[in-house]
Every structure is written in C-alpha cells, then in structure tokens.
Image: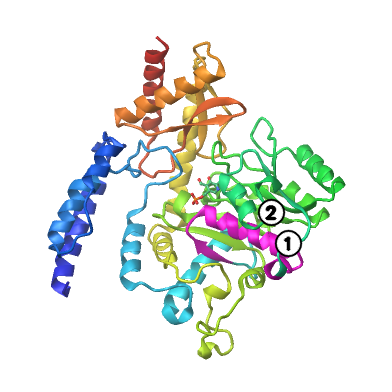
Amino acid sequence: MDAEEFRTLGHEVVDLLAEYFEEIEQKPVFPDVEPQALRRLFDESLPEAPMAAEAVLEEVREKLLPYCTHVGHPGYMGLITPSPNPVGVIGDFLCSALNQNIGAYSIGPAAVAMERRTVRWLTDLAGYGPGAGGNLTSGGMMANFLGLKLARDWASGDRAQHDGLEGRWAVYASEERHVSVDKAVDAIGLGRNALRALPTDARFEVRLDALEQAIAEDKARGIRPMCIVGIFGTTNTGAVDNIRELRKIADRERMWLHADAAYGGGMLLSRLAPMRERGLELADSITIDPHKWFYAPLDAGAVLVKDERRLTASFGMKPSYLTDEMEGANERYQYYVHGFEQSRRFRSLKVWMSFKRYGAAQIGEWIDNNVRQARHLYEMVAERPEFEAASEPPMSAICIRWCGTEMDAAEAKRFHAQVVERVEKSGEFWISTTELKGKTWFRINPVNFRTRTEHMDQLLALLEQECRAIAG
Ligand SMILES: Cc1ncc(COP(=O)(O)O)c(C=O)c1O
C-alpha cells in the first residue's frame, strides 16, 4: 500500500466513523441476528490472493458494522463498556501506526515518557504521593492479577518470586468482588479455595465483623492472612468498602491491601461526590480502568502502586537480550523491569489525548450525569410498588427487580431473563441480569456520555410494559 492509497482509505474510514457516531442513536443497540448466521458470514478459508483495500473496507461495512453491539448508543447500559470518546479513537489509530512498544525505552522514548505522565495523573487522582508508580494494563482483570502478585511477593518477604510459597495463605474479599479476584488468587499459586468470600451488609459493603472472624479462624488453623481486596465500586451496585477500616485491619495483621477501583475509580473525577473520604489512597495497590468510566476505548486498565519500588521487587528481571547498555543513570525507564508484560501497546496515548482534549472537568461532568441518571431511576422506582431497587446507587450502577407478581426464586430468574431478552430485541436498550443475596435483578449501568435522563424514563416504561406483558 503506497502513501496515496493509505491516505484515501484513511479518509474514507474517518468519514465512515464520523457518520457512525452521528447516526449511532438511530441504530438498534443490539443486532437482530443469530450466531450461526454470523459464523456463516465469515466462513471462508485463508485468502491466497490480495484484494483491493476498498473492497476489504466494503466487507467490513457489510459484515461487521450492522452486527455490532453499539456500546456508544445512549441505550447501552449493560456490562461495563462505555461509549468510547472520539478523541480516544483517534489516539488508538495513531498508536497502531506508530507501534511504539512500551515494554522497552529503546522502542518508544517519548511514548514511555507519555505513559509515565499518564500513570502519574492516575496516581495523583488516586491520592498517592510522589513515590507511586504503575502500569497500564489490558484491563481490570490483569490489574487485579498484578495487585495480588505484588501482595504475595511482599507478604512472603520477597521469597515467593524465587522459591514459591511455603505454607497456606488466605485472601479476603467481599461476596460482591469481581471474578478477576478469584482468578488472581488462583494464578498466584494459592488456589481459588484460599479466597474467603465475605458477606456484605444492606449496602453491599463488606462486613468488617465477618472479615475479623474469617481472619481469626484462619489463624487458628495455621493459615496466614496475605491480602485484603477492598472494592471501590462493585460491579453490580457500585458499593464502596470502607477502605479506612480495611487499612487498620491490614496493618494489624501485616497484610497487603489492594483496592479494586476498576469501575468506581471514575468517581475520583466527579465534581459532586469524589468519595475522597473513603480512603482509596490508603491501599497499597489500586486497580483503575480508564477504559471503563474515563470513557477511553478498549483497552486501558491500570494497576497503581503506592511504592513504585514494589513493582521492581516483583518483576525486576533483566535478560541480556533486553538490557539497554545506554541506560546510564537509570534515566531510561524500562517498563519490562517494572511490570509483567514486555511487548505492549502504547495504551496511554488515547488516555493522554482524552485528558488533554476534554480535561478532567468535562469527563467529571459526564460521570456526574451518569450518577444523576442512576439516581433518577432509583427515585422513579421508589414510587412504583411493582419494582424494588437493591440499594440507593452511590455511582451509576443500579439493580432493580419486578416484584409485582408472586414468584419463587427460579420463576423470578426466568422472568427477569425473559424481560431482558425482550429488551434486547426492542433494539432500544441493552441491560443484563444478575443475582444479589439470592434474588434476580435487572442490572443497569449507564457509563455513557450520550445517555440522557429521558433515557431512564423510557427504559423504565419499557421494563414496565414488558414485565406486565409477561406477567399477564
Ligand atoms: C470491579 C471490577 N473489577 C475488575 C473488573 C475486570 O475488568 P476488565 O473487564 O477491564 O478486565 C471489572 C469489570 O467489569 C469490575 O467491574
């Protein structure tokens, strides 16, 4: 492809996307298509002969675009994948073209500096001091894994990196944790059964008495407490654990404290309620996802560490083929020495560009709008006896259920699933279901700068209509 062809194709793609964003609200949120039809659509062997780029783009237009889940549509309020901000989209385009490899300084000097600045913005937001550091990751799943690995290495006195773990250890998190915590406990060699899933109170915050009891029981059985994972914004309801109290317990028991703010970290930009009093900065490490509530396109997660040196203690290996002889006075920051991954995408570019273009003020306003929308839905539900809300939403996530019909648990599960299916078919909204304290709920989470308050009115009206239609 020569420069001219690249230019023509690039302009066409930008035109296509500008139109896509302009018309997104008119599209059905979810495509009306069966999985088998999609498999057939792409059923072909590896192409032998080249094709004109125009024709390839035409296939993308025909086979991909009509069958996307349009997460930028204001009615998308499902699994936490926000409307990507357009500046971030351009950032990712640039990122792929430049292909800077953030793992090593020699493959992206300015990119490494930008990434470090972006990490610094995030550590400042979290309330960490100048000694903090971090890594941009593929997402919260990987960031939670890194946080747990940091915990393990620190708790073992930096032996586990070399010798593995001796004895039995335990990790503590609430029943509302994300599944990434279970996977991380497994991946660091403890086994999933080493995770103590603690009950929550009526606001879905971890019960401190249950934590104390679990620690005491483990110690009595010779099991050593390693780490508490506090949640700053649960996936289902946005509940925030009391990080201040968790810190006190972690200190007393010599445990690492990791905070999962993958979703809830967005609240740090809120102008209305940034939740500073919750003490996020007291955690030893934090997961925070710009690709969630900072509206960055996938992928951009982050793990932040209060003491940057812990990254090096956990990951600081330097094979000869990577050693940079020009490193001199350690001015060439080598991410591969301070993190798990080596080759990795220049994820910070889109985050950096988005912060510059919109500023914290605009992004904070989007976040506050989403919080207001969840509260509006909560207030409407409070006035309707056929619905109940699981809790008053502290963030944008809200769970509500139909209680206008007598049903046992299995019937209620089927009922809510059927309603969600009809909502999906409507093409107007996309929401999911979840389980909380033994009951099935509609799970609704607008992390979307296009969503407006009126969408909440329309969603509740649709839910009411579909619930009544099924209830008969
Ligand atoms: C609280 C929490 N932690 C971690 C994750 C995992 O993040 P990711 O999907 O970016 O891997 C999620 C995803 O929704 C989450 O809600």
Residue contact between numbered discs 2 and 1, judged by CB atoms under 8 Å: yes
On the picture, is 54 further left or further right than 76? Answer: left
Find residue 403 and report its horizontal and vertical position in percent. 52, 16
Residue 188 visible to an observer of this rendering? yes
Tell me the amino acid under the disc marked 2. Leu
Most prominent secondary structure in the magenta stretch?
helix
Find residue 306 and report its horizontal and vertical position in percent. 66, 64
> Please, what secondary structure does the residue beneath circle 1 have?
loop
Residue 154 vs 216, above or below: the answer is below
For the point 23% across and 52% down, which residue is it? 18
Tell me the amino acid under the disc marked 1. Leu
CA distance separating discs 2 and 1: 8 Å
Residue 420 vs 106, above or below: the answer is above
Dividing the picture into quadrants, the one containing residue 428 is top left
For the point 56% across and 57% down, which residue is it? 143
> Mark 2 packing: few (<14 Cα in 10 Å), some, or many (20+)?
some
Most extreme residue toward the right is 220
Which quadrant of the figure contains the C terminus? top left
Find residue 152 and report its horizontal and vertical position in percent. 70, 60
Residue located beneath label 1 in the image: 165
Determine if the magenta segment contains residue 383. Answer: no
Earlier sequence position, callout 2 versus callout 1: 1
Determine if the magenta segment contains residue 147. Answer: yes
> Mark 1 packing: few (<14 Cα in 10 Å), some, or many (20+)?
some
Dividing the picture into quadrants, the one containing residue 46 is bottom left
Which quadrant of the figure contains the N terminus? bottom left
Tell me which segment is drawn in magenta.
134-162
Residue 402 visible to an observer of this rendering? no
Q: Nearer the viewer, residue 123 or 471?
A: 471
- Per the rendering, the mark at residue 190 is 2
